Amino acid sequence: MPVDRIDELGGRPEPEQTLHVNRNRALRRFLRHRLAILGTVTIAVLVIACAIGPYITPFDHLFIDIRSRFQPPVSGAHVFGTDEMGRDLLSRLMMAGRVSLTIGFAAMMLSTIFGTLVGAVAGYYGRKTGAVLMRFVDAVLCFPNIFLLLTLAAFIQPSLMTITIIIAATSWMEVARVVEGQLRSLRERDFAVAAEMIGAPNSHIMFKELLPNAVAPIVVAATLTVARAILMESYISFLGYGIQPPEPSWGNMLNNAQQYLNSAPWLAIFPGLMITLAVTSFNFLGDGLRDALDPRLEV
């Protein structure tokens, strides 16, 4: 049973009103964070646009029209202009966003699940098991993420699934450290000791008693992981190891635009703007959730 539902004296559940009050306080703190609200709205707009936009636009993202090469933005039917092959840039941006956001969310889920499991085991068992696991985490963290990411990408056939997996493989360590610290602290709390004394199995204590009380920092870490995953996908696609043309991602669109920076700068401006919007919005959302879920803050 979560800490905030345990009575200090008898271990009896507190009234349901307490949980509602805590939720209302967190919601009020989040709503006061204007940048977090702006980030949430921006993320929602990006997700909706990338999900349904390719079905609405009059041009397919792979349709080539040589006669319409390098049309600038707001020229005729092409709102964002066209690229070097006459493809509509708006439809490609939305399809690329679908790819980049999918990788971001999927990598976040994988890295959060694995990092939570490693951190939970290390934090709960401690001693030799925890020391070995956390020294492994520290060893992986010693390598710069981008070099580790590029090394893995160079030896794996690039696809949506493989790129997601290698990004998750280089993003779980921060989550593991957060969870380990939280469970190591909660492990000594009265409710955890009481559950152990009545013979509750370790898995029950770990996943039913301790982890529910560590949800807030996990949620914040997961939100920031999405932003990091989108940036990582952009890095490796920009360097040619990620999603391969003709399928677009924001990163490989930037890569293709390098040679046209002087003659057609919009080819780099729009995908760069999308990456900036997405990453900044997730960071704002993470900051808002951190402030809202921090119990040390006043109402």
Image (cartoon, grey):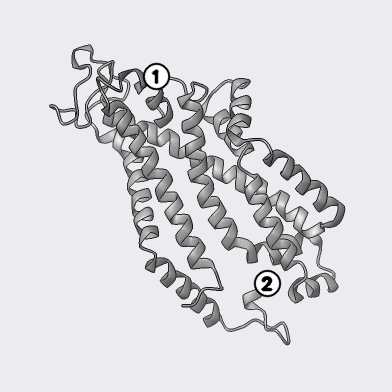
Picture coordinates of residue 44 (x, y %)? 36, 50
Q: Residue furthest right?
A: 128
Earlier along the polypeptide chain: callout 2 or callout 1?
A: 2
Task: Tell whether label 1 touches label 2 (CB within 8 Å).
Answer: no
Q: Secondary structure at mark 1?
A: loop
Q: Which residue type does callout 1 highlight? A: Pro
- Read off the residue under disc 1: 246
Between marks 2 and 1 in the image, the one whose residue lies nearer the viewer: 1
Q: Residue at x 49, y 23 (%)?
A: 239
| 231 vs 78: above or below | below
Residue nearer the viewer, 29 or 17? 29
| 170 vs 178: above or below | above
Residue nearer the viewer, 192 or 75? 75
Q: Quadrant of residue 172?
A: top right
| 34 vs 16: above or below | above
Picture coordinates of residue 177 (x, y %)? 68, 52
Number of other residues with Cα within 10 Å of mark 2, as a class: few under 14, some 14 to 19, many 20 or more: some
Give the quarter of the figure containing the N terminus.
bottom right
Q: Quadrant of residue 178?
A: bottom right
Picture coordinates of residue 218 (x, y %)? 59, 56
Mark 2 to mark 1 CA distance (whole Å): 51 Å
Q: Secondary structure at mark 2?
A: loop
With 48 as the anchor, is 169 left or right in this view?
right
Q: Residue furthest front?
A: 262
- Read off the residue under disc 2: 1
With 113 as the anchor, is 160 left or right in this view?
left
Picture coordinates of residue 138 (x, y %)? 72, 44
Q: Residue at x 67, y 56 (%)?
A: 179
Q: Residue furthest top?
A: 66
Q: Which residue type does callout 2 highlight? A: Met
Number of other residues with Cα within 10 Å of mark 1, as a class: few under 14, some 14 to 19, many 20 or more: few
